Amino acid sequence: MAAETPDSTAQPSHVLDETEYGQSILAKLNEFRQDSLFTDAVLCVDQEEFPCHKNVLAVSSPYFQAMFTSDLRESRENRICFNDVSPLTLKRVIDYAYSGKVEINTSNAQEMLAAACLFQYPAIVTTCEEFLEKQLHASNCLCIEMFALLHSCTKLQESAHKFALENFTSVVENDEFLDLSLERLQEYISSDLIDVRTEETVFNAVLRTSPGG
């Protein structure tokens, strides 16, 4: 069999593939945002204003994509106001949209989790849940469980509930236990997973949450 001869008409080529290209473009867009260049939306909370690019917000979040592509009033207006977040939290969300980075700590974890649920940033939600799971303590697990329930964070809710059951003897000594509803108290004391040394612990817990207890 005769060997194939190279195609004399083929042109030599080389593919340029800059692995950091996307990140550099995003960084440049962030510079534009900070200088209010080419921005086409202003997000507002109270008296604070944050010029942004709709396309960056839309590509980073299904919430913003729906907002800017629907028939809602916000899709036609450039100034959009929010009442459900603080200015600092909104700034952190916007910074994340332009950089993919956000710092979660004890002072902002719950507020960032609420904002991430609202604006649909699942990576922030997961990070906040994981952070709060590590902060679970007998003095805060009931509060964190209710917060997780409010924002439909099932994994965090289950972790906090499990922690409360496993540390019930210590949990009942904290003031937040006194705020438990009767329904939630019954849910705890009826669980087979509750970890108490004696039934007296459960009895005293019920007395503490009873009027005049």
Image (spheres, rainbow, N blue to C red):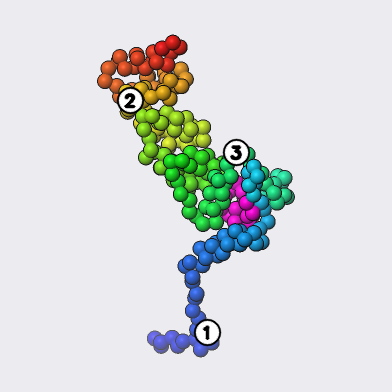
How far across and down, in percent of the image, does residue 110 sit?
48, 38
Decide whether residue 58 is among the magenta residues.
Answer: yes
Q: Are marks 1 and 2 in contact (CB under 8 Å)?
A: no
Badge 3 marks a residue whose secondary structure is loop
Query: Is residue 120 something one can see in this rendering?
Result: no
Quick check: can you spot residue 195?
yes
Q: Earlier in the sequence, mark 3 or mark 2?
A: 3
Tag 1 secondary structure: loop
The CA distance from mark 3 to mark 2 is: 34 Å
**Bounds of the magenta span?**
50-66
Quarter of the picture containing the C terminus is top left
Precedes in sequence: disc 1 or disc 3:
1
- The circle on residue 84 is 3
Amino acid type shown at disc 3: Asp
The three-letter code of the residue at mark 2 reads: Ser
Residue identifier under label 1: 11
